[in-house]
Amino acid sequence: MTSFYSATMTPQTLGNTGHQSIDNRNYHLVLVTKYRRKCMTGPMRDRRETLGRNTAAKWECKVLEFNGEADHVHRLLALTPKVLPSAAVTRRQNGSARCWNSTVKRIMSIGSWP
């Protein structure tokens, strides 16, 4: 006879498992441009998604969903209990900002968005 938990929970729904615990911490993060200006284009959002996923992989996070519009971006993050939400946001902002700034400088030097 199988237990209730083994029958209803699959590895995809379990989240993070510890010695005697099951943990599933998901956070919805909304990043907004200054003054809600509509300045992000499709390729810019795609680049943001790539940077966000790369940064998350480095810091024991997982980006479950990513979408947005011209003035904001939504991210659904899955964090382990070891990672504080505030630390994850700070790391994400710092890591992706460095990559984003280098991308923007490169674009400004050639004069067009790839």
Image (cartoon, helix red, strand yellow):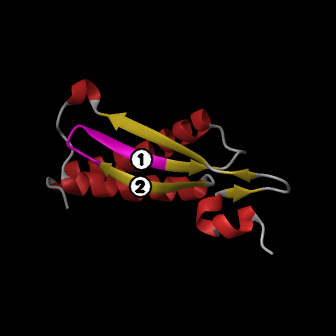
What label sits on residue 40 in the rendered view?
A: none
Query: Nearest the camera: 17 or 36?
Result: 17
Left or right of 10? Residue 99 is: left
Query: Nearest the camera: 66 or 41?
Result: 66
Residue 61's x, y, as percent?
A: 58, 53
Left or right of 42? Residue 14 is: right
Could you tell me the amino acid type at mark 2?
Answer: Glu
In the rendered view of the protein, which quadrant contains the C terminus?
Answer: bottom left
- Residue 71 shows in the view: yes
Residue 72 included in the magenta stretch of the image: yes
Residue corresponding to mark 2: 65
Secondary structure under badge 1? strand
Say if mark 2 contacts mark 1, CB within 8 Å.
Answer: yes
In the rendered view of the protein, which quadrant contains the N terminus?
Answer: bottom right
Residue corresponding to mark 1: 75
Left or right of 24? Residue 75 is: left
Q: Tag 1: Cα neighbours inside 10 Å, few (<14), some, or many (≥20)?
A: some
Count of numbered tags? 2
- Residue 106 shows in the view: no
**Closer to the N terminus: mark 2 or mark 1?**
2
Query: Nearest the camera: 44 or 6?
Result: 6
Residue 57's x, y, as percent?
A: 56, 59
Q: Spot the residue most to the bottom.
A: 1
Residue 62 included in the magenta stretch of the image: no
Q: Residue at x 23, y 44 (%)?
A: 69
Residue 75 drawn above or below residue 2: above
Q: Residue at x 57, y 41 (%)?
A: 88
Residues in magenta, as a range: 68-76
Left or right of 109? Residue 11 is: right
Could you tell me the amino acid type at mark 1?
Answer: Arg
Residue 72's x, y, as percent?
A: 28, 38
Q: Residue at x 79, y 56 (%)?
A: 18
